[in-house]
Amino acid sequence: MNKMQKEKSGAFIVNETDSNDVFIPEEFNEEQLMIADTCRSFIDTEVAPHFEQIDKGDRALMRDVLKKSGELGLMGVSIPDNYGGFGQDFVTQMLAAEVIGSAYSFSVAFMAHTGIGTLPIMYYGNEDQRQRYVTKLASGECLGAYCLTEPGAGSDANSGKTTAVLSEDGKHYILNGQKMWITNGGFCDTQVVFAKIDKDRILSAFIVESDWEGVEIGQDEHKLGIKGSSTTQIYYNDVKVPVENLIGKRGEGFRIALSILHMGRMKLGANVIGAAKSAVTLSVNYANERKQFGTLIANFGAIKYKLAEMVIRVFAHESAIYRVSKDIDVLMDDYKKTYEDAGRAAIDAISHFAVEDAILKVYGSEMLDYVVDEGVQIHGGMGYSAEMGIERGYRDSRINRIFEGTNEINRLLIVESMIKFAKKGNYDLFGEAEKLNESINDLCEMKIEGGYYEQKMTTISHFKKVIALVIKAFTNSFKSIAQEQEIQNNIANMIMELYITESLALRVKKIEDTHNNASLPLYKDILDVKLYDAARIINKEALEAIASFSETAEDRIPLVNAIKALTDVPLVNVKDARRRIADKIIEENRYKI
């Protein structure tokens, strides 16, 4: 496949991808690495020394540290230079987001400002709005917030009750309503606020300044984690919003909200990599210091299992993140050739990858939850103490499965989007499935042969066949799939395992083909274990789905036999592979693989 062609979201389910066509972290250029180092240095010097004080909810301190990051230019990585930013590509934005992700509550405040607090104006605003607001947001002169969620609305964003009524003189919208769970609410200068104009069915979006009359900021919420992040309710009482502060068109707010959620999911997927790598480092540091029964706990096989599994999941997720990030950059460049507005081109390119956005949000947040949970376990009783950084990481991780749409919503989105795109003709998922059904007995005879990578990619191709067969059988069995959320979860879990594992395999192959890397044997260990586990997961989820809607045991036999055959993989000595992976980071005493 030529990467200069427009990639279809979810097309990986039927397409074969060449490893030469994917971007891998080993290809970061010097400028990208310098930006990452600048972010890392800022966290080490300006943020980390204040972690404890920030966690006490010190609004003034958080505001001060955020402004310092703006003065250094970190808030302008994704902003074009004509608005005071650096105009970096999406891969670089994601790398910066990854590094910032290690900074606990600061990461949440920073990403809320640079993402959902700034980019709706950057992507959907007009030139005047960008000059008036984006320039100040990019420099840190102003700090931003995003005000969508309302009491009682939850995940149904368009059900909000906040209203905007045009004034008699036509110069203002009079805003009334209430927003909740507003990140940076306690100190923001600008707000992107969603409301319905008059009796519109669909939301519109507005820029509101916090010091305007009628804007009332509530107290900070007391939360399980991310305690240093200011999270408030905001009330609007007859707030006069100038008509020129309407973002985009009337009724375009819901589209803006959904598009920004796509962007937020993707960048959350990068954030969790930084948080996870930090947790791995904290865990191996402790394992290399703590002695039990006369030896370091790093020497115990049970601890090595945990450390290795943490690394495998981080490395695999990272592979997928930068794969799709480059796809987005390619599509952005393509769109910018035909779009009149570069901002719209950028957000449409990000939003295009709805399936991948949701996959990486769900898999990444659950990957981090696994990593910090095992990190606490490695620390034992000390992991439960607030003296240790892993305790903060554990608490702060939990929100990620709720942020940017709950994982439950996103699992449904993965399946529904893939089916919708297939029915639109973006790729021939159902045609491929029909061909497989016609020769379903032959699938049981398919062999895994060839060299190392041929075997891996054949196995991954088999996974695709399993998923196509299950989706086809599922959609044939129900007129409406919306009520079958348990089965959709089965399918979503299979799709996630496929995309993550394929991305990992493509990365490892490209490393061998293009890089002289001494760690290649360890990368193959990571791939061996991940592929072996993916086969088990896909087997279980597929059989569970089939059992949920096949009418009789006889109906199931051909499909069940095919699933079992296509997910049958050679045995792998996962114990030794995991020990080699763990020994590497134990030797390095940090996440370095």
Image (cartoon, rainbow, N blue to C red):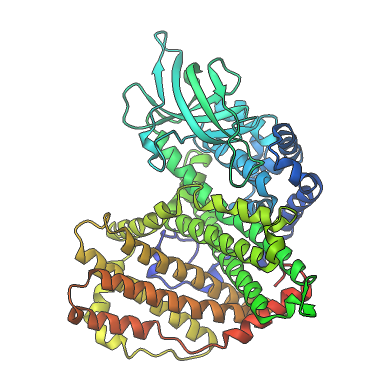
Q: Residue at x 43, y 89 (%)?
A: 448
Q: Position of residue 18 (x, y in %)?
A: 50, 73
The answer to whether residue 90 is above or below residue 156 is below
Image coords of residue 10 (percent x, y):
40, 62
- Residue toward you, 480 or 463: 480
Of residue 373 and residue 381, the one placed in the foreground of this image is 381
Q: Quadrant of the C terminus?
A: bottom right
Query: Quick check: 25 left or right of 333?
Result: right
Q: Is residue 321 above or below residue 86?
A: below
Q: Is residue 9 left or right of residue 81?
A: left
Residue found at the far top of this picture: 169
Q: Is residue 126 visible?
A: no
Tell me if I can see residue 162 in this picture: yes
Q: Residue at x 26, y 69 (%)?
A: 548
- Name the residue located 66 percent from the left edge and 72 percent from the top edge: 307
Determine the image quadrant of residue 190.
top right
Q: Position of residue 587 (x, y in %)?
A: 78, 76
